[in-house]
Image: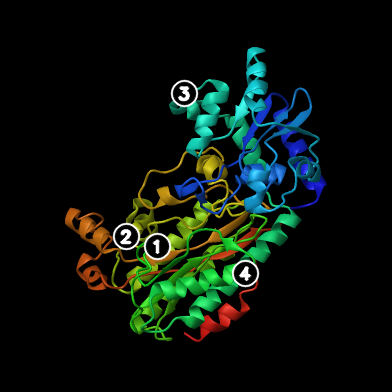
């Protein structure tokens, strides 16, 4: 947790921005795996964490009553029946005091408080409900059918939260950089261990162990695969072969909740083949060009187009594409090889605030494209100082996509299908790093020195 004043100032700024109404925050509950007492590791809602700092207390709610200048945390103190399983816990009042909240009420009082406010015609604002438990609570407290919750969420509240959390402070950046450095350790450990004959799950376990050994959890399930063409591959069963490339996409999450997110691609043999090196170098060229373009005022959508054009030019150089690169990208032909976005915001969530809606976080309300490829771009808005984001171009040879587009003769003026079909067994390559936008450019977060030395040996 940060100092008390950090949380006080965050809540004060939010109140000043919205100026009226009751702001409702719903903390997360425990989530059972297969029966009530066997739960997944608890993870607090990130916005609740941001404003109230409660990391390990499930079942909470809170309000900022802007009109009456009240801040209340609703929850129940741990009973002896709970404490015998968990050990002594800080009381809710102690935790509330640590973040500058003076009023704590039992959880049963939430509904009463909100019903009384609703009866007076007062505005009650809430954020998108990304868990079913949130929808059920809102339904109970506010008399809204669960299916109607989404249409009642407060856009003003969403945008106010986004416009705070998007701009990272110095203390947040220090936490993110710690997470990124541990993420580098995770990647180096996995890459050093990878050998022909090992299983993907053996490497994944080393990556995960490194996070745990640093007092961290994972910011998302590890991707550790010789089938990098599957963008979010969580099948760890394949054996590493000498001719394979291994793609690792993994990040650490600190106890504070702040995240890192990196991707590495390496040859299992220790040396890229000529074909692998050629495609890897195209990915790195796209990555480096995107990084050099990072600065305030530049739309990340334009940086995506820049990286995409470099990928098209690279594909042309090896006979897989034809024609004008700009025309190919505008038409969407590049998405044969680059199906995902270039990056995303990062902070307390590895895809920061994705539960609040990409349209607000990454697009500032501007409609998203529906075109295959760019529709997966999570960040498009002009960059500003304080933004923390990833840059992660990739090239992926997906056999199912290749067969589908070839059968449809889609973009055959840009894609050389006869040559492309010779690459069905290639796989995929991605490279990802994390950056802070500064007043005059960017800063690479973390120290990649050890990983860089390892990569240079390939």
Q: Which is in the foreground here, disc 3 or disc 4?
A: 3
Q: Which residue is mark 1?
A: 234
Q: Residues within 10 Å of mark 2 (few under 14, many from 20)?
A: many
Q: Nearer the viewer, residue 448 or 371?
A: 448
Per the rendering, the mark at residue 336 is: 2
Q: Which mark is residue 182?
A: 4
- Where disc 2 sits, the SS reads helix
| Image location (x, y in percent) of residue 301 | 50, 51
Distance from the alpha carbon under mark 1 to that under mark 3 = 36 Å
Could you tell me how far apart the alpha carbons at marks 2 and 3 are, in whole angstroms?
42 Å
CA neighbours of label 3 inside 10 A, class few (<14), some (14 to 19), many (20+) = few
Q: How is the image coloured?
A: rainbow
How would you rate the neighbour count of disc 1 (Cα within 10 Å): few for under 14, some for 14-19, many for 20 or more?
Answer: some
Residue 338 quadrant? bottom left
Give whichever of 299, 177 is nearer the camera. Answer: 177
Above or below for 223 versus 354: below
| Residue on which the image places disc 3 | 145
Q: Secondary structure at mark 3?
A: loop
Question: Tag 4 or tag 2, which sits nearer the N-term?
Answer: 4
Could you tell me which residue is drawn at 49 percent across and 28 percent down? 149
Residue furthest top in the image: 120
Give the distance between the C-alpha atoms of the residues marked 1 and 4, in whole angstroms: 21 Å
Measured as percent of width and height from the top left, residue 89 is found at 72, 49
Pointer 2 or 3: first along the chain:
3
């Amino acid at each position: 947790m940060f100092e008390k004043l950090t949380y006080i100032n965050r809540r004060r700024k939010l109140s000043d921005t919205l100026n009226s109404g009751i702001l409702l925050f719903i903390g997360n509950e425990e989530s059972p795996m297969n029966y009530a007492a066997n739960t997944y590791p608890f993870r607090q809602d990130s916005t609740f964490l941001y404003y109230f700092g409660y990391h390990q207390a499930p079942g909470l709610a809170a309000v900022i009553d802007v009109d009456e200048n009240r801040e209340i945390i609703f929850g129940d103190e741990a009973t002896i029946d709970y404490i015998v399983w968990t050990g002594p816990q800080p009381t809710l009042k102690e935790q509330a005091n640590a973040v500058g909240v003076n009023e704590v009420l039992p959880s049963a009082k939430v509904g009463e408080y909100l019903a009384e406010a609703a009866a007076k015609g007062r505005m009650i604002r809430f954020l998108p409900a990304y868990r079913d438990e949130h929808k059920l609570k809102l339904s109970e407290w506010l008399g809204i059918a669960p299916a109607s919750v989404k249409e009642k969420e407060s856009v003003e509240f969403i945008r106010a939260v986004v416009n705070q959390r998007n701009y990272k402070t110095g203390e947040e950046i220090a936490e993110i950089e710690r997470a990124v450095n541990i993420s580098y350790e995770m990647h180096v450990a996995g890459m050093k261990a990878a050998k022909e004959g090992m299983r993907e799950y053996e490497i994944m376990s080393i990556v995960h162990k490194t996070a745990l050994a640093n007092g961290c959890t994972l910011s998302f399930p590890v991707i550790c695969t010789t089938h990098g063409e599957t963008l979010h591959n969580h099948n760890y069963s394949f054996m590493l072969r000498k001719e394979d490339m291994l793609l690792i996409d993994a990040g650490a999450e600190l106890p504070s909740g702040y995240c890192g997110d990196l991707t590495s691609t390496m040859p299992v043999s220790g040396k890229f083949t000529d074909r692998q090196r050629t495609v890897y170098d195209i990915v790195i060229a796209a990555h480096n060009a995107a990084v050099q373009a990072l600065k305030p005022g530049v739309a990340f959508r334009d940086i995506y187009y820049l990286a995409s054009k470099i990928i098209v030019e690279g594909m042309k150089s090896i006979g897989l594409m034809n024609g004008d690169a700009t025309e190919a990208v505008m038409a969407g032909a590049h998405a044969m090889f680059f199906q995902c976005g270039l990056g995303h915001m990062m902070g307390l969530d590895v895809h920061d605030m994705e539960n609040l809606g990409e349209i607000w976080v990454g697009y500032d309300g501007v409609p998203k494209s529906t075109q295959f490829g760019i529709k997966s771009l999570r960040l498009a808005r002009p960059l500003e100082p304080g933004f923390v984001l990833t840059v992660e171009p990739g090239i992926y040879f997906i056999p199912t996509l290749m067969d589908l587009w070839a059968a449809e003769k889609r973009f055959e003026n840009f894609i050389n299908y006869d040559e492309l079909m010779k690459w069905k067994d290639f796989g995929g390559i991605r490279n990802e790093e994390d950056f802070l936008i500064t007043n005059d450019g960017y800063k690479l977060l973390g120290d990649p020195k050890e990983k860089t030395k390892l990569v240079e040996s390939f």
